[in-house]
Amino acid sequence: MIRNFIESDIEAINVLGNRLTSNFSKTNNLLELKTNSFTKILVFEEKNTVRGFLMYTELNETADIIELIVQEEYRGRNIATCLLDYMISDLKDSVKLITLEVRKSNKIAIQLYQKFGFQIVHIRKRYYGDGEDAYLMGRRLER
Ligand SMILES: CC(C)(COP(=O)(O)OP(=O)(O)OC[C@H]1O[C@@H](n2cnc3c(N)ncnc32)[C@H](O)[C@@H]1OP(=O)(O)O)[C@@H](O)C(=O)NCCC(=O)NCCS
């Protein structure tokens, strides 16, 4: 089941988020985000457990994917695909472009986004704290 996050999901989201970005829980105050109408978090829940989440912002004509993570043991089961499908179908009609940054080395995520029609539009040099470059990827929405 995919749904918007609720307060009781915060711990599980932080655990997953910290696996990808070590300071995820420090840089994102999820309780505060609940009152911020631009940032949304969708969770994929199965057997009362959060298996993955997608965090994005939606502002005027652009949606930006901030984090997309699936619990390691549950990867390859279309969970990310379901989260992306849900997000895209839930975007307001005013949104014409979806953007995201991804590590150049993250072949799996790049393949996932390309499958969803995202294209590499720019390289952000040394975007990450460890000096790795990011690809800026984008997908225009025909509305
Ligand atoms: C990237 C990630 C979210 C994908 O989640 P997932 O639920 O396993 O993805 P899905 O099962 O929906 O797979 C969708 C597509 O992703 C790509 N993909 C998934 N696993 C892959 C693998 N092991 N090798 C190559 N491509 C893969 C494929 O294009 C796949 O489509 P296909 O099944 O038609 O081949 C997951 O690997 C993850 O959490 N990675 C760590 C966090 C991360 O890197 N997030 C992206 C940050 S921008």
Image: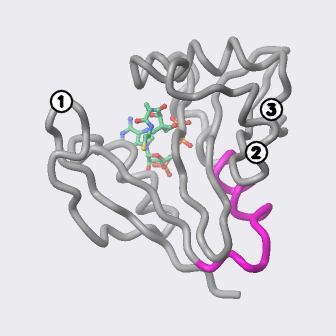
Q: Secondary structure at mark 3?
A: loop
- The residue that appears at 39% across and 45% down in the rendered structure is 109
Judge from the rendering whether residue 10 lies leftward or rightward of residue 25; answer left or right: right
Amino acid type, mark 2: Asn
Which mark, residue 36?
2
Residue 94 colored in magenta in the image: yes
Tell us which disc is closer to us: 2 or 3.
2
Between marks 1 and 2, how big is the CA–CA gap? 29 Å
Which residue is label 3 attached to? 5
**Left or right of residue 128: residue 84:** right
Please determine whether, in this image, residue 94 is positioned above or below residue 41: below
Please provide the residue range marked out in magenta: 82-96
User: Residue at the bottom extreme?
Assistant: 143
For the point 75% across and 25% down, the residue is: 31
Mark 1 or mark 3, earlier in chain? 3
Q: Quadrant of the N terminus?
A: top right
Dividing the picture into quadrants, the one containing residue 48 is top right
Q: Which residue is mark 1?
A: 130
**Residue at image location 64% in from the left, 26% down from the top:** 29
Residue 57: image x %, image y %?
A: 63, 54
Could you say which is closer to the camera, residue 121 or residue 57? 57
